[in-house]
Amino acid sequence: MPELPEVETIKTALAHSIGKCVIKGLIINNYRLRLPVPHDMSEKICHQSIIDYQRRAKYILIHLSNNLSLIWHMGMSGRVKISDTKPTTIEKHDHIILETTNGWVTYNDARRFGVFTYCETNRLNEHPLLKKIGLEPFDEKLTDAYLRNRFQKKNVPIKVALLDQEIVTGIGNIYASETLYLAGIDPTRPAKDISADECGILLSSFRKVLSDAIAAGGSTLKDYQKPDGSLGYFQNLHCVYNKTGQKCPQCTCDINQTGGIRKIVQAGRSSFFCPQKQK
């Protein structure tokens, strides 16, 4: 699934390529996404100007001149293709095609777990998809004291708590494993036992990991690619994710004895960590 860095990359690409343009037309080849695409979508968004772009958690919000906003989620496998001219070939799973005064945008989603809907802009915070979302990772209100307060109420492993979108939003499975490695914290430790000092370390760690991933254009794993068709390369910088049995960076351990990076399953998700460096 595209996580925060990948969604930020897509949002930025849209803003830079089609920018503040007018939506001229909309082709919907499949209304059956995770939530059905509203049947009045064309009526609501066509001939409206795009006035701004925003990312909230893993959602792209596109604000329009009629005080409506598009709410767009990539789902598990969604990707965006941007072109200067109308696509000559409609690929399988090209569900939505936007025509704008600055080019064409195609949304392709093999698993159809995405969302493409709208809401009144001034009521976005009340929308069911957005109203329970926690603080953004780079929000000034997000402090080590906030994390400590929220974690104290969680009798779950810290890796699971990091994935709780009502605490901090946008941290997905890849970046939770990488954050905990950088912070030196074992993913199996109960969240309620994470100290105030460790919360500060976690805060700086996930901000660094996410910043580096955004700068790298995200991680290309399975379905994800950037809107220009190129690949994100943060996967080349992964320290532990999907590296079972390998040495972690600057490892001095004898992996014949330690077994290297370990993989476990927590709440149905794979976690990767170094049992020597993460305590």
Image (cartoon, rainbow, N blue to C red):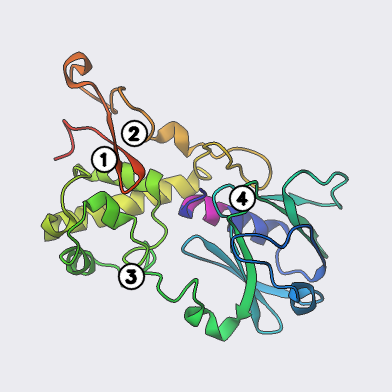
Contact flag, marks 3 and 4 (Cβ < 8 Å): no
In this image, 171 relative to 258: left or right?
right
Label placed on residue 47 = none
Q: CA distance from mark 3 to mark 2?
A: 27 Å
Q: CA distance from mark 2 to mark 4?
A: 25 Å
Label 2: which secondary element: loop
In this image, 77 relative to 133: left or right?
right
Report the residue marked by disc 2: 239
Q: Residue 65: horizontal and vertical position, in percent? A: 71, 81
Label 2 crowd (10 A; few <14 / some 14-19 / many >=20)? many
The amino acid beneath tag 2 is Cys
Label 4: which secondary element: loop
Label 3: which secondary element: loop
Q: Residue 210: horizontal and vertical position, in percent? A: 40, 51
Residue at image coords 22%, 21%: 259
Q: Nearer the viewer, mark 2 or mark 4?
A: 4
Label 1 crowd (10 A; few <14 / some 14-19 / many >=20)? many
Report the residue marked by disc 3: 140
Contact flag, marks 2 and 1 (Cβ < 8 Å): yes
Report the residue marked by disc 4: 78
Q: Which residues are magenta?
A: 5-9
Residue at image coords 22%, 18%: 255
Q: Nearer the viewer, mark 3 or mark 4?
A: 4
Q: Nearer the viewer, mark 1 or mark 3?
A: 1
Judge whether residue 141 is colored magenta: no
Q: CA distance from mark 3 to mark 4?
A: 30 Å
The amino acid beneath tag 3 is Glu
Contact flag, marks 2 and 4 (Cβ < 8 Å): no
Residue at image coords 25%, 23%: 260
Contact flag, marks 3 and 2 (Cβ < 8 Å): no
Q: Residue 261: horizontal and vertical position, in percent? A: 27, 28
